[in-house]
Image (cartoon, rainbow, N blue to C red):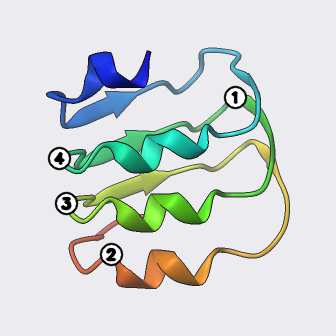
Amino acid sequence: MINEFNDYNDQRFSWNKLTGSIPDNLGKLPSLKQLDLNHNYLTGSIPSSLGNLSSLEGLHLGFNSLSGPIPRALGNLSNLRTM
């Protein structure tokens, strides 16, 4: 399913009652500029593969039940403006 979103640069999935963990393969969307997963029921850790999203400007993961540290790889996101 992720391959279907390759040409999109803005993914907003807030308030969708999503459950489970953040898919590791989201890191395979190099043109993604905004990823909004706020206000869901996501669990587990933030995948370090999100550090591959070189175009990412906004990453919104609040109001979930995520655990663990923020991956160091997110420090590579030079275009990231909001989190």
Q: Amino acid at mark 2?
A: Leu
Q: Amino acid at mark 4?
A: Ser
Q: Which dot marks residue 40? A: 1
Q: Which dot marks residue 58? A: none
Check contact, mark 1 vs mark 2: CB within 8 A. no
Secondary structure found at label 3? loop
Check contact, mark 4 vs mark 1: CB within 8 A. no
Mark 3 = which residue? 55
Please state which of the two labelled residues, at mark 3 or mark 1, is closer to the viewer: 3
Q: Amino acid at mark 1?
A: Asn
Relative vertical location of residue 6 with respect to residue 15 in this rendering, above or below: below
Answer with left or right where residue 57 lies relative to residue 43: left
Q: CA distance from mark 3 to mark 4?
A: 6 Å
The percent position of residue 25, horizontal first and vertical second, equals 50, 41
Q: Amino acid at mark 3?
A: Ser
Mark 2 = which residue? 77
Mark 4 = which residue? 31
Q: CA distance from mark 4 to mark 1?
A: 24 Å
Label whose residue precedes the other's in the sequence (4 or 2): 4
Check contact, mark 3 vs mark 4: CB within 8 A. yes
Q: CA distance from mark 1 to mark 2?
A: 24 Å
The percent position of residue 5, horizontal first and vertical second, equals 28, 23
Answer with left or right where residue 40 lies relative to residue 41: left
